[in-house]
Amino acid sequence: MKIASWNINSVRFRIEIVEQFLREEAPDVLCLQETKVIDGDFPEAPFRALGYDHVIKHGQRMHHGVAIIARVPVVADDRFDWQANQEARHVGVRLPNGVRLENVYVPAGGDLPDREVNPKFGQKLDFLARMTEWAKALQHPTILTGDFNIAPLECDVWSHKQLINTVSHTAIEIEALAGLHAAHDWVDLGRHFIPAPQRNFTWWSYRAKDWTAGDRGRRLDHMWASREVADKAVSHKVCEPCRSWLKPSDHVPLVTEFAF
């Protein structure tokens, strides 16, 4: 089973490259973040035309939004409010083999890494704290994937020295993500298959006219798994060419294949 994750930054605006990705990679399940559409306007028809008959949505107008698209039967049964304000940032399903698949879009956190002057940063840390408490109670084999908006390792950014005080790579965020990781003894599949300090980026800013020129990337997108699920993982890749497709997202997809 191939499971993909992609912050698409508006599924309607970029539906053509989503279709291209599905034709080329043919994942069994695609987790999307930042869909930016209410459930009633979600473009289901293009997915169904490609054989993806299971569309599980948690949308919101103009902002946020997550969805799980599958060509295998899934059961929808959770939408956690880790933001505590009803923003559409999580949707989870149960796969045919019983494994849980949780798709999350962690808040970006604003520009300043100080919760006193930037409430969005505090919301991000509180979101991660709620996720950590959830992970401590997990009793099912689980895959947790999505846009975590944190690059935890020094080699997960183009310049640790220049970004150490930049939101997504600050010490307090890295510590919060480490707490989430320890809460369930997750396996970070991105670094399992592409060990540090190898280059492994999933996001490049739109500000650069040529994203390849300076390669100023960050690893903000992740796929983690319970250890018993991680043992079934046979490959993992970052689909960098998608960053150069027509009307690209600033993120690229991850694809992990499992032997189940």
Image: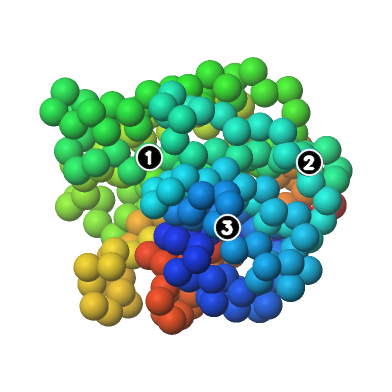
Please give the label number shown on residue 62.
Answer: none
How many labels, in total?
3
Q: Residue furthest left?
A: 117
Nearer the observer: mark 3 or 1; the answer is 3
Q: Amino acid at mark 1?
A: Pro
Q: Is residue 8 left or right of residue 155?
A: right
Query: What residue is rendered at 48% in x and 22% in y?
Result: 130
Tag 2 secondary structure: strand
Q: Nearer the viewer, mark 1 or mark 2?
A: 2
In percent of width and height, residue 51 lies at 78, 68
Q: Position of residue 259 (x, y in %)?
A: 82, 55
Specify which label sits upstream in the sequence, 1 or 2: 2
Asked if the residue under mark 1 is in contact with the one under mark 3, i.e. CB atoms within 8 Å, the reply is: no
Residue type at mark 2 is Val
Q: Please give the residue where the numbered disc 2 appears in the rendered image.
A: 75
Task: Report the side of 74 relative to 157 (left or right).
Answer: right
Q: Which residue is mark 3?
A: 42
Q: Position of residue 143 (x, y in %)?
A: 66, 41
Image vertical order of residue 6 relative to residue 104, above or below: below
Q: CA distance from mark 2 to mark 3?
A: 19 Å
Residue 249's x, y, as percent? 41, 67
- What type is the residue that disc 3 sits on? Phe
Question: On screen, 100 above or below 65?
Answer: above
Label 3 neighbour load within 10 Å: few <14, some 14-19, many 20+: some
Reading the image, the residue beneath label 1 is 107
Rate crowding at label 2 as few (under 14), some (14 to 19) or many (20 or more) other CA atoms within 10 Å: some
Task: Tell me which residue sits at (29%, 64%) in the image.
Answer: 205
**Crowd around label 1: few <14 · some 14–19 · many ≥20 (10 Å):** many
Q: How far is disc 1 from disc 2 in space, using C-alphas?
A: 26 Å
Query: Relative to 59, does residue 141 appear above or below in the rendering?
Result: above
Task: Give the spatial CA distance, label 3 vs label 1.
Answer: 22 Å
